[in-house]
Amino acid sequence: MKCPFCGYEESKVVDSRPTDESTRIRRRRECLKCSGRFTTYEVVESVPIVVVKRDKSREVFNRDKLLGGLLKSCEKRPVSMETLVRAVDEIEAKLQNSLDREITSQQIGELAMEKLKAIDEVAYVRFASVYRQFRDINTFMEELKKLLKEK
């Protein structure tokens, strides 16, 4: 960190504490050359995840959109909001931890189906029917057979 007084690039941290909202860390530093003291703030860098849709258009990942899709599939099912929010948190964490900054909507859909399968099978089938665009009863039955076979 460059000293604002003399421009020297070496300093030591004298004090470190979180800010009121705990989103940044306030660091009090001392220059090793001129002994001048100054304050810096450290923030976690958040790089947005870009979703590549089926039509090749791109948009920034929106967790509310994912949560909305999960909510629709769990309508009138015994699934708590807390469970769905946790599932979205886990999916978002997995996306953030991957090295890819662009991810396809298909990959997000697969992650969502994986979570729903563990949460509620009826919700899983509902989500899969929209996501996989079942065209007739046969493709729907194939998905049900796969689900029963896994059990």
Image: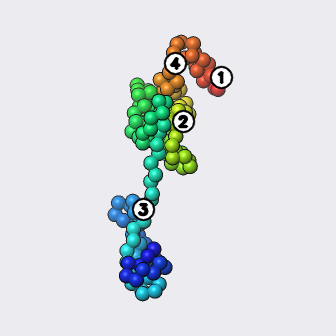
Amino acid of disc 1: Lys
Amino acid of disc 3: Val
Residue under the point 40% across and 36% down: 65
Instruction: Please tell me how many numbered marks the rendered image carries.
Output: 4
Asked whether the beta carbons under mark 3 and mark 1 sit within 8 Å of each other, the answer is: no
| Residue 85 visible, this angle | no
Amino acid of disc 4: Phe
Mark 2: give few (<14), some (14-19) or many (20+) Cα within 10 Å: few
Q: Which secondary structure lies at badge 1?
A: helix
The residue at which mark 3 appears reads as 43
Task: Look at the image and tell me in which quarter the C terminus lies.
Answer: top right
| 128 lies above or below 115 | above
The residue at which mark 4 appears reads as 134
Which quadrant of the view contains residue 62?
top left
| 51 lies above or below 31 | above
Query: What is the C-alpha distance between the residues marked 3 and 2?
Result: 29 Å
Task: Look at the image and tell me in which quarter the N terminus lies.
Answer: bottom left
Q: Which mark is residue 149?
A: 1
Asked whether the beta carbons under mark 3 and mark 2 sit within 8 Å of each other, the answer is: no
Asked whether the beta carbons under mark 4 and mark 2 sit within 8 Å of each other, the answer is: no
Compare residues 117 and 36 and report the one nearer the observer: 36
Compare residues 24 and 33 and report the one nearer the observer: 33
Residue under the point 41% across and 28% down: 72
The residue at which mark 2 appears reads as 107
Looking at the image, tell me whether mark 3 or mark 2 is earlier in sequence order.
3
Q: Residue furthest front?
A: 56
Q: Residue furthest left?
A: 20
